[in-house]
Image (tube, rainbow, N blue to C red):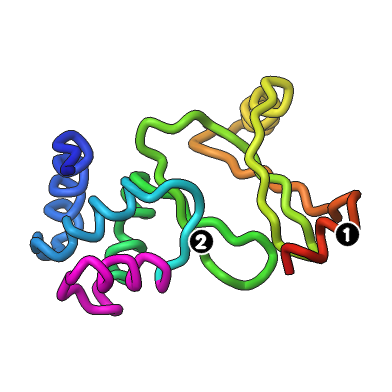
Amino acid sequence: MRNEKAAEVFRTFLKQVKNRITPERFEVLDAALEHHGHFGADDLYVQLKNSKSKVSRATVYNTLELLAQCDLISKRNFGDNLNRYESNYKRQTHDHLICVECGKIVEFSDARISDIPKEISEKLGFDMNSYSFNIFARCKNEKECKKRK
């Protein structure tokens, strides 16, 4: 289901940066915003193909970069040299705890953390735009961790 406000943000962005406005790009937008959690470009491509889409892999990759540039999605790297994405649209700000052994990602929010980037930015003479906070750790329960590998 198309989110018209997000589509308008994307349409305006594409015009500003002089990129073509195509149905395929909006198909990728819809799929990215509807996806729950973190996903890779290939994950989204496979999902689109499974739903009989004719969108190319290159269009998925390129469109995800454009969506990240206009802040409708966030591009994340959790230390494994893979880019993952998640929707920014109507989502609460959150941070990530990542297991360095099995790759499990846990999202969490803590007001104490969310205030720190703004305070540091102001102290150093910056206007904060956004921040990303990741904690890299190991699952305490080794048996459960190995099951996820």
Front position in the image: 116 or 123: 116
> Where residue 61 sits: x, y (%)?
34, 71
Q: Is residue 57 left or right of residue 109?
A: left
**Would you place residue 58 above or below residue 115 in this image?**
below
Which element is circle 2 on? strand
Q: Residue at x 84, y 52 (%)?
A: 139
> Where residue 29 sits: x, y (%)?
25, 53
Q: Residue at x 69, y 56 (%)?
A: 104
Q: Residue at x 73, y 69 (%)?
A: 149
Q: Is residue 92 left or right of residue 8?
A: right
Q: Is residue 43 magenta?
A: yes
> Where residue 1 sits: x, y (%)?
18, 43
Q: Is residue 85 visible?
A: yes
Counting residues from the start of the chain, the first of labels 2 and 1 encountered is 2
Cα distance in 3D space between marks 2 and 1: 26 Å
**Would you place residue 26 above or below residue 134 in this image?**
below
| Residues packed near mark 1 inside 10 Å, few (<14), some (14 to 19) or many (20 plus) | few
Amino acid type at mark 1 = Lys
Which element is circle 1 on? helix
Amino acid type at mark 2 = Arg
Span shown in magenta: 42-59
Q: Is residue 23 magenta?
A: no
Residue where numbered disc 2 is placed: 84
Q: Is residue 24 left or right of residue 67?
A: left
